[in-house]
Image (tube, rainbow, N blue to C red):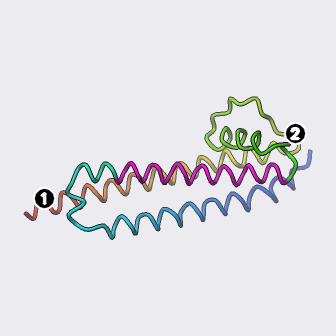
Amino acid sequence: MSWEDDWLWGLPLFVATIVVHVTAFLAMARMLAAAPAHLAQSKILFGVSVALFALFAAVLHALEALAWAFLYVHIGAVPSLAEAILYSLEAITSYGHAPAFLPPHWRLVGAIEAVNGLVLFGLTTAFFFAAIQNGRSRNSTRAGSV
């Protein structure tokens, strides 16, 4: 079995999704850092900002899965966009319970997407942790200086 095509299609999308992901989260981090200081003192507003950050992350992950779904349709690995989206969401989250399968010569692309999902969700977790830590330290610094 030859998997050159899988690597040629999968790796560029792997890299592109990571670049987009990191760029989007850095932009979100800049927006959070630019928030007025008094907003960080409110636990309710802090909770709302974390919820919005989670919503942003979910939409970003969905768009990345959609990019993979478009790839599957483009290369002819999956016949319909609906089936490709289902497969992609299963692969990127490593859930893997859908009855959708790729033809044998395209299965490596699905594995590449699964690894991509692990990296993307790991990056999301790291950004969440850093944002919450930053918010907590901004809060404690202000509370200590009052």
Q: Residues within 10 Å of mark 2 (few under 14, many from 20)?
A: few
**Amino acid under disc 2:** Pro
* Figure quadrant of residue 20: bottom right
**Amino acid under disc 1:** Ala
Quadrant containing the N terminus is top right
Q: What residue would you read off at disc 2?
A: 104
Chief SS of the magenta region: helix
Magenta stretch: give its range. Answer: 49-74
User: In x, y percent, where is residue 45?
Assistant: 27, 53
User: In x, y percent, where is residue 7?
Assistant: 80, 56
SS of the residue under disc 1: helix
Q: Residues within 10 Å of mark 1 (few under 14, many from 20)?
A: few
In this rendering, the answer to whether 23 lies above or below 4 is below
For this orientation, the residue located farthest to the right is 1
Query: Taking 137 as reference, is 103 left or right?
Result: right
User: In x, y percent, where is residue 78?
Assistant: 83, 43
> Of discs 1 and 2, which sits in the foreground?
1
